[in-house]
Image (tube, rainbow, N blue to C red):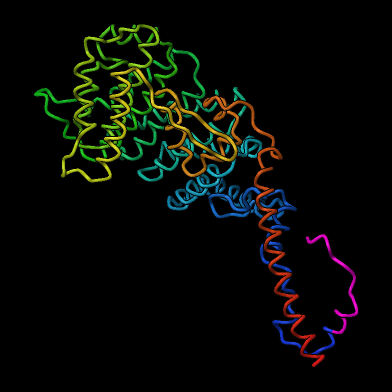
Amino acid sequence: MPRNRKKQSAADTWQQNNDLSDDDTSNDNASTYSCYSETQAGDGALAGSQDGSGESSEPGSGFEKYEEKLLQAIENASDKAQQTRINAFQTINEVLVHHYIPDFIDDRKVTLMDAVEKSLRRGKGAEQAWAARIIPLLVIQIEALEDIGALVTVLKPVLLSTAQDGAAAYDARAKCCAALGLLCFVGVDDLSDVLPLMKVLQGIFAGSYLKGDNSPSGANAEAGALHSAALSAWALLLTLLPPSDVVALTLAGGGNIVPSVHSLVGMLQSPHLDVRMVAGETIALLFELGRQHDDEFLEEELPEVIEAAQKLATDAHKYRAKRDRKVQRATFRDVLHYLEEDVSPEISIKFGREMLLLNSWGMHHQYTCLRNALGFGMNVHLSENLFVREVLQLGAKIDEPERLRKTVKAEQRFLNAAAFKARTITRGKNRDKRSFAIN
């Protein structure tokens, strides 16, 4: 509110007693910026009044609105009608992406877990896919370790069953692979539980290996999406292994858990961009982990890998989309630079007043998997989610006043400028009317 509010003067009384138009009697000083800001400032939402889902974040209205929306969706997730369940999972996904609410979820996790499990077991197609998408969001929201352990115990078997079910839809299987990766990345510490899962995932993405005659895989686009999701989940679990174990498993051969470099290089010939991209980044990650233990890790395989990366870094085939070529060249230039110079790309991501630096292939892949799960809500969780901040080495959460200080100052300048402009216009009108009355 303007600080120079005064009692009604005689001049103001004279003005009100004159016949003026509606435009003249309106309060021009009350700008829309001022009114809007007062509402938001009173609710502590100066940093942004709307979340990504388009709902207000005011404690008195918006907060209760999305709470009620989530409660209704959780109830509908057990409805008899399949479309109602799908819509419920979509709503749950939307709310969990844009809000970090561990306390609210803690009271309802059992109900939500039960609905997800039933849809994975009995549902088909889109229902299974949406149910699987809820699992990474749920495990990221839960803070208690024993609750995460219970989530793994209940949901891991049904996810494994669906991911390996050849009769299930490709999209549902792909979402189950992604959910398995993040679920076990968060909730499994014992490597004896991680390695069998990596073996299962390796058996899925093996469908994009070269054929027996060294020709590219003939997998269709949907199968390619499944293979890339399985390989991405496998690479995420690879970041949990100590470098010494990575080297031992790679040199042991057999390809049951860690595939041979030749097999991964063969995936670079896939007709699908997502498979080529994930395979290239996984190769770089494998070399990064191996080189941490052995500087000469897989030196004899390096020329073949460099040659394949060079081809994709300079790919100009016109039968591929222009955007696909651009993204592919950028990614494989980084892969090639790492393989040749042992220099990982550095990517800076700014959110709020903080900066996230991704300076290794391991951190880059962990960030990518989290971003795929969180989508447009990534910045919210980077700022608020304790688990996400721990994984990406962001440290303790910044206090709200410190984080909003710069935003408050900038907004105050805009408010002062708007109020000054409104005052000038109003005073100009009043001066004109007084001059007219005197004359």
| Residue 424 seen in the current view | yes
Q: Is 420 on the left or on the right of 146, as rendered?
A: right
Say above or below: 94 vs 35: above
Q: Is residue 3 magenta?
A: yes
What segment is highlighted magenta in the picture?
1-14
Could you say which quadrant of the image residue 253 lies in? top left
Quarter in which the N terminus is drawn: bottom right
Nearest the eye: 306 or 136: 306
Nearest the eye: 1 or 139: 1
Q: How many marks?
A: 0
The secondary structure that most of the magenta stretch takes on is: loop
Residue 7 position in % (x across, y down): 90, 70
Q: Is residue 227 magenta?
A: no
Instruction: Give the residue at x 29% y 27%.
Output: 280
Instruction: Give the residue at x 73% y 58%.
Output: 38
Residue 389 position in % (x across, y down): 57, 29
Say above or below: 182 vs 52: above
Residue 317 position in % (x across, y down): 16, 40
In the displayed image of the protein, which residue is found farthest to the bottom?
Answer: 439
Instruction: Give the residue at x 59% y 54%.
Output: 55
Q: Is 327 on the left or on the right of 157, as rendered?
A: left
Could you say which quadrant of the image residue 36 lies in? bottom right
In the displayed image of the protein, which residue is found farthest to the left?
Answer: 213
Say above or below: 230 vs 411: above
Q: Is 303 on the left or on the right of 214, as rendered?
A: right
Quarter in which the C terminus is drawn: bottom right
Nearest the eye: 358 or 419: 419
